[in-house]
Every structure is written in structure tokens, then in C-alpha cells.
Image (spheres, rainbow, N blue to C red):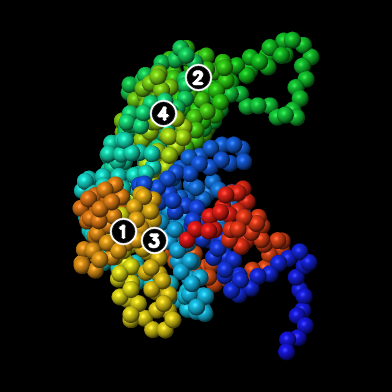
Amino acid sequence: MRSQPMIILGEDSQRVQDKDAQEHNISAARAVAEAVRTTLGPKGMDKMLVDSMGDVTITNDGVTILKEMDIDNPTAEMIVEVAETQEDEAGDGTTTAVALAGELLKNAQELIEQEIHPTAIIRGFSMAADRAREEIDDIAESVDPEDTDVLQQVAETTMTGKGTEVNKEFLAELVVEAVRAVTVESEDGGNVVDLEYVNIETQTGRSAGESELLDGGVISKDPVQENMPTDVEDASVLLLNEPIEVEETDASAEISLSNPDQLQNFLDQEDSRLREKVDQIEDIGADVVFCQKGIDDLAQHILAKKGILAVRRTKQSDVGFLSEVLDASVVSDLDSASSEDLGQGSVRRDEGDELFYVEGASEESHGVTLLIRGSTDHVVDELERGITDALDVVSQTASDGRVLAGGGAVEVELASRLRRYADSVEGREQLAVESFADAFELVPRVLAENAGLDPIDTLVDLRSAHDNGRGRAGLDVFSGDIEDTFEAGVVEPAHAKGQAISSAAESANLVLKIDDIIAAGDLSTEGDDEGGAPGGGMGGMGGMGGMGGMT
Ligand code: ADP
Ligand code: MG
């Protein structure tokens, strides 16, 4: 019956349609989810990623893993975006979001095999996601945003498993203090947290337990000359975004000199221009200069003689932060600078760490610095990721005040509520809503699995606890017990969970909507040969193929 198909594609291009297209995409997306699930929870394992330059990252953080992996598959990249959105919107919960998206797609595939049309699945998933978010509003516990105990628990829950084990309590305290230092009451009586005013500085060499929360900023630079003062109380600080150098003559400019006097003259002029600049600095009353640009040798010398502390090539972000700390302007033209541009405060030098501590004295000064210490770069980097996540979730809790019981408790509760909701849903969408409910149970299953516990037993116990009205029953991965995780202090912010559900559902739907893949080149890369997912070709991740076999 069919007429001859018209060929409109180039010779090398490939086309996959309908079920094959869905299968192809789902496999690729699932391969990504599989790659991060072993890191979920406090007992999750870390991954070591080596980039093409040989640089090593060791992490447990979902979004970091996916960003560092050299993923070369368009569908897989869509799942990576889930993690990135989650990171931007919530700061934590990236592994959960990606694992959930993978599980949704796995369940969708089963429905497709039962001849349920993707559009019905997509509709059902959207209904389920909306409902789940409503249920979260109902399940969430409202806590006093000023309650530091809860904030501390939220911080600890986020940081567990991120290299913070030994010093978890202490580091969580620092995070809570940092957030509280930058929390202000808004006009409507709520709290506003401005994390811009929390600066993170890392130092290798000492232990994490020696990390500190400091008022003000720190600058990891040396003075330009050794004979400058290093500790200045009641300092007037100039932040300068202009070099203290004579302007470079244009590369093409030519100066013709006919006798040695002229040369001397020219050099003298340069010197006097430099002296003038230093005089300007002195005249407006600065005794400390943090310069973003370079400082000429002669200028350094004169500054030292005048007893002015000068630092060159200060990072732009540090200068920006110091302007908040000191309530100072950043001066970009000395000629128009005045004493009003200066900031007041104190500057202290720590010779051992080669750091300047800068504290503001004005009423208007803002800003604290979390100085994170750790023995090696890898340790410090992972600590920093954990602490950044914790800052985000603690600030959400401090402004929003809604939290949930972790350890899979909220997921099991959502699954059970969605199943009840499914009964009221007509048509094939009902099956999709049920699939969505099932997908939530991935979280407690994987938490158990990663802790070396039996996932099936755990799930059965959790389900029966929730059926008996214990809505906050979750898994304590350390004891293996089912308990009220909220009481046990495993607490997550509601905002992050809601976001994880939305982004997982949206990306799953995006993948499901595709029924036609037209590629200009070859679709199936090496993933095929390794028995992995069809087309799950992950450039640079030779091991990915083997992961397709997991369920
Ligand atoms: P994500 O990237 O999704 O934040 P994590 O590896 O940080 O992934 O793991 C988060 C999960 O670990 C959450 O479901 C949280 O409730 C759970 N969790 C954290 N601490 C505990 C604990 N002590 N016991 C059980 N589960 C925990
Ligand atoms: Mg986390």
C-alpha cells in the first residue's frame, strides 16, 4: 500500500522514530541517572573524575559529577540540565532530582511497552508533579526560622557525606552563624538572607576543624614590599581599580630622542607622574591600598617610605567584597578620588597563612567570611561544595521556615498519597500517576542500598509505617532503623524538594515528547559495543556502557 518514501536526508544522517526514538532517549537519560545514584545519601560513595588535562576531582556532589563528566549525548545532556537547574534554584538535591528523572523515565518505558501513548504519560506525570507539590505544602512542618537548632539540623543533613564527617557539627554551626550574620528582617516581618555577603575562602594545610567564621573579608596576597606596615588599626582603606604605573606607551608609538638629556628628561617625567599618583593616595588620607591592577616598582618604594600598606593584583571579586565590608567605593580614577571614597576599618596580617584580615568599622559594613581549612586541595574543594550547599538550604529555611523529614520519609509519604490520588484520576493517566508514585520510592531504596541494607525490606517497613499514620517515618542509614527522621534531626528544606520534583518531571516529559530523532551524523556510538544502552554513547566515559545493565 505504501508509496515510495521520498528521501530528504543526507547520506550520513540517521533517523530513529517512534518507540525506537523513545527507547533510545530513555536509555541515554537513564544511564546518566545510574551514574550518580550510588552517591545518594550519607553513605553514598564518591566519584573520582579525571578531566582531559589530568586534573582530578573527588566528589559526592551530583551536579559536580555530571558537569565534570564528558557527556556527549544530547539526551543525556538534558538530564545534566536537571542537575544544573536544581543547583541554581535550590543549591541541593541534585542527585535526588536526577535519580528521580531517571526512575520516571524507566517507569514510563514500561508504560510505553504496554501501548500507553506518551502523551497520556506526560499528562499523568504533570498531574502527579502538581499534586505532589501541593502535598508537600501539606506535609511540610513550619518551624521558627530563628530556631538555630533546626537550622543546624538542616545544615548537618545537607553536609553529611560531603567530606565533613568528623567536623560536621562544628562546620554546620559556622554555616548557621554565617547565615544569621547576613539575615535581616524584611518589611513584612519575614527574613531576608543575602548570601552575597558571605564570602568563602579556602586554605589548605590545616584541618577542617580549624575553619573559622570571620567578620569582614580576607585577602590572600602579600604586601608589595616587605618593609610596609602589615597591621593597621583604624585604617583608611583605598580600593583602587587603576594601575599605579605610568600608562604604557602605545605599542606602535615611537619616541625619537636625539641626545641623552632627552632620555633623562623622559624618564624623569615618568617618575614624577608616579610620585604624583602616590601623593594623591597620601593626600586623600589612605594608609592601606588594595589595588586590582599592578603597582610600579618605584611607586612601591615610595609607598613603603610613606608607611602605606599596598597590595597589588587583588582579585576583582575580593575588591567588590571589601567595598561592602568597608563601605568604600572602588576608585577607578585617582585624579577624581577623595577621602569620601575610602573605607574605615582594620587590617591585620596572619604571616603563617599569608592572609590579610580586613574588618569594617562603619555602621554600613556588611559581610562575613567563611575560611574553610582542610589538609589537601581535594579535601578543601569537597568541603567547599558541601558548605555552599548548606549555606543555600539554611538560608532557604531561615527565610521560608518550611522543612520536611528526610531519609526517604517525605518520598514514601508522597508515594502513598499519590497512589490514593491516582484512584480519582480517569483514563490512562491514572497509570502514569501510579508510576510517578512508584518513582518516589527510589529514594529510600537507594538510600538503603548505598548503606548496605536490604532495599526491599526497608521499603516494606517504611510503607507499613506510613500506612499506619507515621508520616515522618524514614530510614536512619546509620542504624538501619525506621524512625521519625524529623525527630532524629534529618531535616530538609521543603523548597528544595519541591524544586527537585518539578525539574525531574519536566525533564522526563521533555524526553518523552520526542518521537523522532534526526541526526546529521551517526547516532549509535561506542555505547552499543559495550552492551550498554543503544546510543548511550558517552564520550570519554568508557565505563558508562556497563551501567546500562543495572535496573
Ligand atoms: P542530593 O544531591 O540529592 O542532595 P545527597 O547525597 O546529599 O543527595 O543525599 C540526600 C539524601 O540523603 C536526602 O534524601 C536526605 O534525606 C538523605 N539523608 C541525609 N542524611 C541522612 C541520614 N542521617 N539518614 C538518612 N538519610 C539521610
Ligand atoms: Mg545533598
**Mark 2, secondary structure of its residue:** loop
At 37% from the left and 44% from the top, the residue drawn is 161
Q: Earlier in the sequence, mark 4 or mark 1?
A: 4
Q: Amino acid at mark 2?
A: Val
> What label does residue 276 carry, if any?
none
Position of 415 relative to 488 (above/below):
below
- Read off the residue under disc 1: 458
Q: CA distance from mark 4 to mark 3?
A: 36 Å
* Residue 92 appears in view: no
Q: Which residue is mark 4?
A: 375
How far across and how far down the image is residue 76, in percent?
56, 58
- Please name the residue that numbered disc 3 is placed on: 442
| Badge 3: residue crowd in 10 Å (few <14, some 14–19, many ≥20) | many
As measured in the structure, the alpha-carbon distance from the residue carrying label 2 to the one carrying label 4 is: 28 Å
How far, Cα to Cα, is label 2 from label 3? 57 Å
Q: Residue 533 in the image: state x and y as whole percent.
A: 58, 61
The residue tagged 2 is 224
Q: Nearer the viewer, mark 4 or mark 1?
A: 1
Q: Say which of 41 and 131 sits in front.
A: 41
Dot 3 falls on a residue whose secondary structure is helix
The vertical placement of 36 against 321, above or below, is below
Crowd rating for badge 2 (residues with CA inside 10 Å; few <14, some 14–19, many 20+): many
